[in-house]
Amino acid sequence: MNEDLLKIRHSAAHVLAAAVLRLFPDAKLDIGPATENGFYYDFDLEHKFTAEDLEKIEAEMKKIISENQRFEMAEMTREEAEKAINEFGQAQFKLGRLADIPEGEKITVYRNGDFFDLCAGPHVDYTKRIKAFKLLSVAGAYHRGDEKNKQLQRIYGTAFASKEELESYLKQMEEAKQRDHRKLGKEMGLFTISDRVGQGLILWKPKGAAVRQSLQDFILELLREQGYQQVFTPHIGKLGLFRTSGHFPYYKESQFVPIVERDEMDKMKDKGMSLAQYEEKVDAGDVEGFLLKPMNCPFHVEIFKSDPHSYRDLPVRLAEFGNVYRWEQSGELNGMTRVRGFTQDDAHIFCTPEQLDEEIQGCLDLVKAVFEKIGMKDYRVRISLRDPASDKYVGDESNWEKSEAAIRKAAKSLGVPFTEEIGEAAFYGPKIDFVVKDVIGREWQLGTVQVDYNLPERFDLSYTGQDNKAHRPIMIHRAPFGSLERFTGVLIEHFAGNFPTWLAPEQVRLLPLGEDVIPYADEIFKKLKNAGIRVGIDASGEKLGAKIRKTELEKVPHMFVIGKKEAEAGAVSLRSRIRKEFEGVRPADEAITLIVEDIKQRNLPDGFGA
């Protein structure tokens, strides 16, 4: 986001808060930042905002903008700011936000009209600079994102420099609603989420499982070509494993609570320990237990370490569709794209320093091949680097410098735009993230590649070099899909449920016209099944037009229409979902061959993305 747009959106958030206070004077304010797609403000108010309220608030915002109020910044001492917050009647949350500002750091406030806010800026000069905005929705949001705190009401909005940009964005938002994977996933019978099972845990239904299996088969072909070996690892591991890797405690806030061995738990109960005392013992390592794995990498490290290796054995490439579990706040969960349990198309490469550049390139080629097949050719690269001033990173500084240099070199080789983000690296190494645009222009972070000198060090990994001495391998982490759940959710929206034939849950539907051709249709059904094609049949007595409409609504890519003439000729009449017209009568075997070839080539739908 450029500086001008940041100013517009941040200023719109202040105007939103000012409008709410005019209409609802009892509202208590928390925070209102600009975001990547707009802005929001959090309110504590007994009255629940409605769609009608948003219209009134938006109208009041327009009044404030027309008043052309000036945004004025003032620097204050902590005592002055505290007094001003109290006088404005917003002590409930704002004093806590004031306390967040470190001693010695500048404290600033902004005023526009009779509105006042603790704020670091930046803002536009006058409210009339806010020319194009729209309030979008209301959602619940816990204060400071903590479920233990009070739930507030968050009003979301967006703002742009021009009305044309705003209209374009709103059109994209409307298109996104129609493509929402939660809506389409339910309509198409792909997945479900059950409160009895747990929020954030995906239940793949048969049709969704067909999509998932097709994705796995696709990536497995590519992995075999690149010399990967499949492995399988358990869902839990000892806490000591994750202490060695650093995931516990460095990743602690994103993990489920450790599972303590039953005899240890009994001992603690007998001693009358509190939950806090139990957690202290676990954190200190005084109690052994297990952890639902948040990552697959420590397990792959142990597989590598279980055998001696020579430089001639390297690179060793280990791949797994591994289930991992991470704690997400319930307010952050979102269908398949933000979950608590998911399957990574994970792999770890153990290589020599001389092999590093080539192995990274192989990982990048793999990610690019995936994007090519799903029609996401417009992407950028984000390089996540360490913040040298932070203490969250582990390992030797020289190793960080080498791994960051390797990542930069690889990113440059892609020939696409890339940015560097300080402080966004994993605690053990820098990474390349691929941010791709879908068919309606939205960005998604998907594939990732990471270089890691630290886990081999922490686990004391080695291989025998040409000099017959022990050497430390370098480790590469990579996941082209990221997670099968998130990737599938993105694909549902990218294709609006209209999957290419190779991914479609049902690839062909037979439409027999009359009882007398059912036996022939059954023969074709068996042939399609034997050819590995996912096929359905509509043997109902409905007219052809109704059958076609139903098939198109259920997003089946191909139809074989079978009447008396086709049955007598051993043929079928072809119709595709995309072209919405008949494509001629063909011998049944020829038509089946066409579908098999379409699946084999993994073609995109005709005209997709055009």
Image: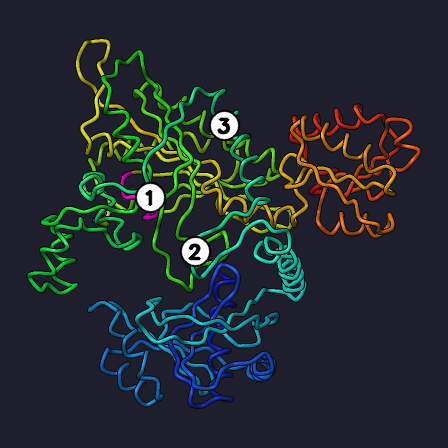
Magenta stretch: dominant SS?
A: loop
Residue 424 forms part of the magenta stretch:
yes
Q: How is the image coloured?
A: rainbow
Q: x and y percent of residue 504 in the render?
A: 65, 40
Tag 3, which secondary structure?
helix
Say few, some or many: other residues with alpha carbon within 10 Å of mark 3 (under 14 / 14 to 19 / 20 or more). some
**Mark 3 — residue?**
220
Q: Amino acid at mark 1?
A: Ala
- Check contact, mark 1 vs mark 3: CB within 8 A: no
Residue 33 visible within the image: yes
- The residue that disc 1 covers is 425
What residue is disc 2 on? 200
Determine whether the residue tagged by mark 1 lies in a helix, strand or loop. loop
Residue stretch rendered in magenta on the structure: 422-428
In this rendering, position of residue 433 left or right of residue 550: left
Q: Quadrant of residue 531?
A: top right
- Measure the alpha-carbon separation of dots 1 and 2: 25 Å
Q: Picture coordinates of residue 540 (x, y %)? A: 80, 48
User: Within 10 Å of the Cα at label 2, are there few (<14), some (14-19), or many (20+) other Cα atoms?
Assistant: many
Instruction: Return the x and y of residue 17 as percentages of the image width and height.
Output: 46, 79
Check disc 2 and give the amino acid type. Answer: Gly
Label 1 vs label 3: CA separation? 28 Å
Q: Say which amino acid is labelled 3.
A: Leu
Q: CA gap, disc 2 to disc 3?
A: 26 Å
Apparent side of residue 552 relative to residue 377 in the rendered image (left or right): right
* Residue drawn at the location 83% of the way across and 44% of the way down: 580
Please give the name of the residue rendered at 67% of the width and 26% of the height, measured from the top-left corner: 530
Q: Bin the neighbour count of mark 1 within 10 Å (Cα to Cα): few under 14, some 14-19, many 20 and up.
A: many
